[in-house]
Image: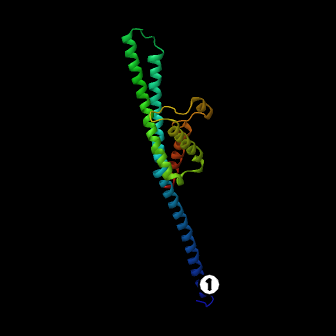
Amino acid sequence: MSENLWPSMLVGLLGGGVIATAITMWSNWHIDRRARRIEHLRHQLQDLYGPLQFFASSNARLFELSKRFQDAYNKEYIQKEWSDAQETRERVRADAELTLEIANEYVELAIKNNEAVVGVLERGFALLEPDDTEVCSSFLVDFARLRVESDDEGTLRTPFEIYLQLGWFSFMPEEFIAAIDRTFKKKQSKLAELVK
């Protein structure tokens, strides 16, 4: 071998090692970054968006069930002509009151779910996506208004004229339910894509 070949071989070996090391470091950085992203998504789903989606979808179903009871109440007790006989009026009144009580119990279950939602938001606010901040903030304000402006039986304490000027509050706005569902599904899809 010629003496000029040794330096070229040495430079080639050392240069190849540096390039291989750089490629390995770059590859490890991307693998670590992907692992951190997967962990963050799992954390968001487990500690924030999963519980929020569970309670929001449960509430949507409870509200729908309550509405079905109210619609049935309207059809059965408001739109029908009943006898004026005292016995009939008493039976109809008792059945109508029971129907409304049941419908309201479903709303009460949703309110209990809302208490859990507040806890989830308080514990997981750092995991909240910026796009969901406004809708979650509005939910919290509505929940505060419900607690402050209603008594323990759910009767409005705020004078009605003032309530009308302030505007109504929602037990859980449809926008909140839709936003949480949309973000939950988006994060599930992204996680599934990353763990392939």
Q: Is residue 80 visible?
A: yes
**In the rendered image of this protein, does residue 19 appear above or below residue 48?**
below
| Image position of 192 with respect to 33: above or below | above
Residue 80 at x, y percent in the picture: 46, 13
For the N terminus, the quadrant is bottom right
**What residue would you read off at disc 1?**
8
Residue at (51, 46) in percent of width and height: 184
Question: Where residue 52 sits in the image (x, y, percent)?
Answer: 48, 45
Front position in the image: 105 or 146: 146
Q: How many marks?
A: 1
- Using the image as rendered, state which of residue 193 and residue 18 is in the foreground: 193
- SS type, badge 1: helix
Q: Residues within 10 Å of mark 1 (few under 14, many from 20)?
A: few
Is there any visible trace of residue 191 in the rendered image?
A: no
Report the residue at 55% width, 74% height from top.
Answer: 21
Give the percent coordinates (x, y) of residue 55.
46, 42
Q: Colour mode? A: rainbow
Q: Which residue is at the front of the view, 10 or 18?
A: 18
User: Residue at the location (56% across, 77% down)?
Assistant: 17
- In the image, residue 26 sits, relative to residue 128, either above or below, namely below
Q: Amino acid at mark 1?
A: Ser
| Residue 33 position in % (x across, y down) | 54, 62
Is 159 above or below relative to 48? above
Q: Nearer the viewer, residue 65 or 154?
A: 154
Tell me if 113 is positioned left or right of 7 in this view. Answer: left
